[in-house]
Image: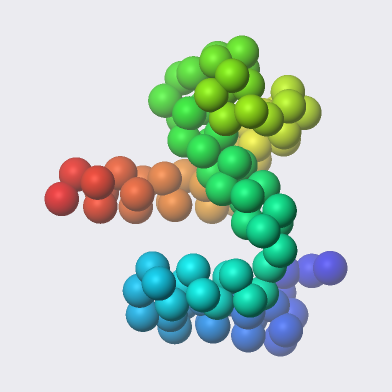
């Protein structure tokens, strides 16, 4: 499935229009399975730790993900579209406030 479709744009717009964390939590709980949400959270945690220089071994212990997942996230961090970097930068900005 391509990311630039009317359907995908609608999905992204609905996420962008959510007002706060609780609305986001409720929407994603309805939209995704618990496992899908857990997997996404683990990938983000992995990306954060990779960006902080953690080793694969330490990430495996801390996040409980496979080396395949860490490798996939690392590939996206290094050669992807910049989505992880943008999200992590915004997280760091908010945490600094």
Residue at (55% x, 77% y) in the render: 27
Residue 31 placed where, x, y %?
66, 74
Percent position (x, y) of residue 41? 56, 48
**Residue 72, quarter of picture:** top right
- For image coordinates 30% across by 44% down, the residue present is 92
On-image quarter of the N terminus: bottom right
Q: How many marks?
A: 0
Name the residue rendered at 24%, 46% in the picture: 95
Residue shown at 15% from the left, 50% from the top: 97
Work out whether residue 38 or residue 89 is closer to the camera in this orientation and state it.
38
* Colour treatment of the image: rainbow
Which residue is at the front of the view, 38 or 88? Answer: 38
Residue 54 vertical position relative to residue 77 in the rendered view, above or below: above
Q: In the rendered image, which quarter is residue 18 located in?
A: bottom left
Q: Please tell me whether residue 51 is drawn above or below residue 56 in the rendered image.
A: below
Does the rendering let one see residue 79? no
Where does the image place residue 37, in percent across and percent down from the top left? Answer: 63, 56
Left or right of 3, for residue 40: left
Left/right placement of residue 68 relative to residue 93 reads: right
């Amino acid at each position: 499935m391509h990311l630039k479709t009317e359907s995908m744009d609608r999905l992204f717009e609905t996420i962008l229009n959510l007002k706060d964390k609780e609305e986001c939590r409720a929407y994603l709980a309805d939209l995704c399975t618990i496992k899908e949400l857990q997997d996404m959270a683990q990938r983000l945690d992995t990306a954060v730790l990779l960006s902080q220089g953690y080793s694969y071994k330490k990430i495996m212990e801390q996040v409980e993900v496979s080396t395949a997942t860490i490798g996939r996230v690392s590939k996206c961090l290094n050669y992807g579209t910049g989505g992880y970097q943008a999200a992590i930068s915004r997280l760091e900005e908010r945490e600094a406030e």
